[in-house]
Image: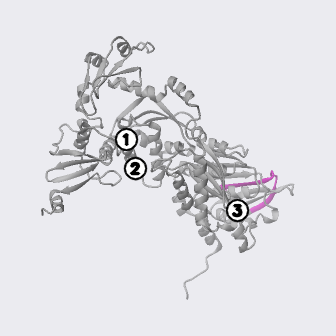
Amino acid sequence: MGSIVVLDELTINQIAAGEVIERPANVVKELIENSIDAGATSVSVEIENGGITYIRITDNGKGIAPDDIELAFERHATSKIRKAEDLVKVTTMGFRGEALASIAAISKVELITRTKENDVGMKIIVEGGNIISKEECGAPLGTTIIIRELFFNTPVRYKFLKKDFTEGGYIETAVERIALIHSEISFKLTNNKKEVLTTNGNGKMEDVVYNVFGRDIASNLVNVNYEYEGIRVVGVVGKPEIARSNRSNQMFYVNGRFIKDKTLSAATEEAYRTMIPHGKFGFCILNILISPELVDVNVHPAKLEVRFSDEGKIFKAVHYAIKNTILGVDLVRGETPEEVVEEKKNEVTEKEVKRTLFDIFKGRQNNKSSVKEEPLEENEYIIEVKENTENDGESIIKKLNTETEKTVVKPFAEEVEISNPEVIEELRVTDVEKEKEEPKIQTFYDKDFEEKPPIPDYKLIGVAFNTYIILQLEDDIYILDQHAAHERVLYEKVKQNFYRDGGKESQMLLLPDILEVPKRDMHMIREHIDLFRQAGFELEEFGENTIKINGVPVICYEMDTKDLFMDILDGIDLNNRTSKQDIEEKFISTVACKAAVKANMELSEREIRGLLDQLMLLENPFTCPHGRPTAIRITKYEIEKKFGRK
C-alpha cells in the first residue's frame, strides 16, 4: 500500500496559515488591508498582550453581505479577482482570499458586519476553522472582527512568539506603515487600553509623520512629487541631518502597498551618496504609482515583494525624484547673511554652555568665552580672560573676575605654560603638569592594574596620512590603524565597565540632553534600558516619546550625545533578533567605535604614545571589535628581500 495521502482541510489550512500569519502583526496588517479595500474612512485597532490573546479591528467600510459571510472564511474565496488574467491589473490591497481562512484556522474568530442594504447585521463565530454559530444581530455599518487566543491549536508556532511587549511593537509598526501612506483614513491604535496612535484622516502625510516620528523629523522633510516616463513618485524625503545608521526609516510603497525591494533601496542610497556620510541612510517615505501591468504583486504570500518589468526605469525614477527634490531645497538656514550674523552674535546654545563650563573645570578656558587674542612671536599666542560681570557669585567665577590669568600656548605637541598656578589650584581643576604627562586619549590601566605590565621597547617612526602609525618593534615594522587601535582600547574599557558589579563609571552632564524619538525607538529604549545603564548611561523617560539623558559613559562625555545615542539604537535595531549576548557585544562595540579617534585626525606624539602604551597592555590588541586588524606587520627579512639583500 502506498504511503501518500491527501491531507485533511484543517491541516491544509494550518500549513497555509504558516505562510501568511507568522505573528499577530500579520493578522492586523491583513485585516486592515481588507478594511481599506472595503472603502473604510475610519479604522480602529485594539490589542491586548501583544495581540496574542485579543485583537479587535473595527471599520466603517461597506461590510460583508449575509450570503457571503460563511464563504469569506473559505480558502481562496475573494471578491477582488475572478480569473488569472485579473492578476495583471490588481489594484486592491488583497486578492488571494487567504487571510480570513488562515486566521480562522489558528484562532477563535468573531465577526460582526452590516451592509447599507440591510437593517440588521450578521454575527458569525469560527474556532479552528470550524463555524460554531451564525446569527443576526444589531450592528453599525461596517465590519468588526475579534481575534482571540491566536495559535491556540498550533503550539509550535506559539512558542516562537516573542514577549508581549515586542509583539505589540511589531503591530504598532504595521499600523504606522499603513497609516503613513493612507493619510486619508483615520486610524486609532489602542494597546492594553492605552491609546498609542491616532491620525485624523485629513489626507496630509506630514501630520501622520509628526504623530509617528515626532517634531524633529517632521520639521526636516521635503515633499516629493516627481514623474519619470509614466512612473510617478510621491511622498516625502528627509534632509541629510536626519539620516540614520540603518534603513528602518526608509519605507517604499507600490500603488499604496508596503514592500521591501533592493532596487528601491539602492536608488535611494545612490541619490543620497554625496549628501550624507558613509554608513548613514536617508529618511524617505515614497509611493511609486505605476500601471499594475508593469509590476507583479503575486510573488510572496505576505505580499511584501514585487517584480518590476523594468527595474532600470524604476531605479532612475526613484533616484531622480530624491536627488532633484533634495537639490532643489536650500539645506542651509534660510535667513539672510546679516540675520545669521546678528543671531549668532547673541546666540548661546546649551551645547556651548556645557562645553564652556566643562572647560573651566578642566582648567582650559574656551576661546569662545570672552577671550582676547594678541599675537606674540611666530606660532605663539597669549590668551587673556577678560573681566566678566554677568557671571554668578560662585567662588570660581569670582576668582576669574578678580584675577587675570595669562596662558602661553606653544605650537601643537609642545608643552603648555600657565602663569598664576594658584588660580588653577584654587579652582580645583586638573593640574597642568598632569595634563602634560597624560595623553588626551582615554586611559584606564591606572585604575585596573596595581602595577602596569612592562611595555616592550619600540621606536615611533611617524604617521602616514594622519591615519596610520608606523613603529619599529625589534626586527619588525608595524603599521597601525589609529581608529581601529583606539576602538579596541575603548572596547575593553566599556566592556569592563559594562560587566562590573556595583557602580558604573558615568559622567553626569551639566545640562541634560532631551531627545524626542519615534515610538518604535522608545519601545527599544524601554526594552533595552538595562543595556544603557550597564554601559554608563543615566536615562529617564521625560514624556510620552521623550528621553532625558542625565549622564553618559566617561569616554563619551565630549561627544555629540544625540548622534551617539541614535547610532546605538540603530545598532540594537539591526541585532534585535539575535541573542542577548550578541546584542550586548554590538552595543559595546558601537559605543567604542563612536568614541574612538577617527582616520585623518591629527594626533600629537604624546597622544600616539599614550595610545600605543594602552594597546600593548591588552590581551588581544590585534583586531578591532568588528574584526578588522589593528596593525599589519612587515618583517626585516621581507624588507631586505624586496631590496634584493636576501
| Residue bearing the label numbered 2 | 586
Question: Does the magenta run of residues contain 143?
Answer: yes
Distance, label 3 to label 1, CA atoms, is 57 Å
At label 1, the amino acid type is: Ala
In the image, what residue occupies the spot 54% across and 29% down? 340
Q: Residue at x 24, y 31 (%)?
A: 414
Tell me the element at label 3.
Answer: strand
Nearer to us: label 1 or label 2 = 1
Name which residue type carries label 2: Lys
Query: In this rendering, does residue 369 appear at all?
Result: yes
Image position, residue 398 (x, y; %) = 37, 12
Measured from the top left, where is residue 530 in percent x and y? 43, 42
Pointer 3 or 1: first along the chain: 3
- CB under 8 Å between discs 3 and 2: no
- Residue 595's disc is 1
What kind of element bears circle 2? helix
Q: Residue 154 location, x and y as percent? A: 57, 64
Measured from the top left, where is residue 603 in percent x and y? 29, 39
- Mark 1 Cα within 10 Å, few/some/many (few <14, many 20+)? many
Spatial CA distance of label 3 from label 2 is: 45 Å
Cα separation between marks 1 and 2:
14 Å
Residue count near mark 3 (Cα–Cα under 10 Å), binned few <14, some 14–19, many ≥20: many
Circle nearer the viewer, 3 or 1? 1
The part of the image, by quadrant, that contains residue 353 is top left
Question: Magenta includes 146?
Answer: yes
Report the magenta residues as a range. Answer: 133-147
Which residue is pictured at 25% across the width and 35% down the height?
Answer: 447
Residue 357 in which image quadrant: top left
Residue 173 in view in this figure: no
Dot 1 or dot 2, earlier in sequence: 2
Query: Which residue is label 3 attached to?
Result: 126
Q: Which quarter of the figure has residue 79?
A: bottom right
